[in-house]
Image (spheres, rainbow, N blue to C red):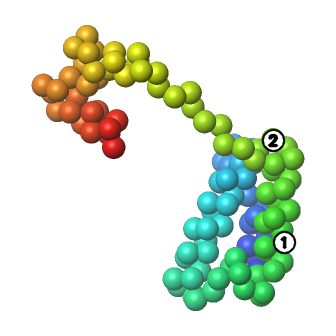
Amino acid sequence: MHDKSLAKFFANAKKKDGTKFKASALLTFRQGLRRHYLDSLGYDIVNEKRFSYSTKLFKAAVKDLRRQGLGSVKHHVPITRADVTKLYSGDTVVFYMDTPNGLLNIVWFEV
């Protein structure tokens, strides 16, 4: 029963707006479900034979998403040194160390 439900989920998973998830998101869902099943039921949905059908459908879904161009992660353009210098200069309040928000921004940026 769990195997068929998981297979149906992997085959039909979509965002609220009806578009398909990227392959990396589907993999994240699977790993989260794996952790949940391991912790609560002791099942390993990735490696156990009784989940072979859902594993097969998962692999097919990921392959299909990659074929549709939804397999790669789109990275943001890195922040340039010039932009970092601007953030730390006294001309902006983004990293202004005399305010709580400025200090918080610095901490979040540096971590």
Between the residue at mark 1 and the residue at mark 2, the CA separation in whole angstroms equals 20 Å
Quickly name the residue at label 1: 56
Q: Position of residue 106 (x, y in %)?
A: 27, 33
Q: Horizontal placement of 65 versus 83: left or right?
A: right
The kind of residue tagged 1 is: Lys
Image-quadrant location for residue 35: bottom right
Residue 69: x %, y % from top left: 81, 41
Residue drawn at (12%, 25%), measured in percent from left and top?
Answer: 98
Within 10 Å of the Cα at label 2, are there few (<14), some (14-19), or many (20+) other Cα atoms?
few
Residue 104 appears in the picture as rendered: yes
Q: Residue at x 46, y 21 (%)?
A: 80
- The quarter of the image holding the N terminus is bottom right
Report which residue position mark 2 lands on. Answer: 69
**Label 1, residues with CA under 10 Å away: few <14, some 14-19, many ≥20:** few
Q: Furthest residue to the front?
A: 81
- Taking depth in this image into account, of 40 and 99 the one nearest to the observer is 99
SS for tag 1? Answer: helix
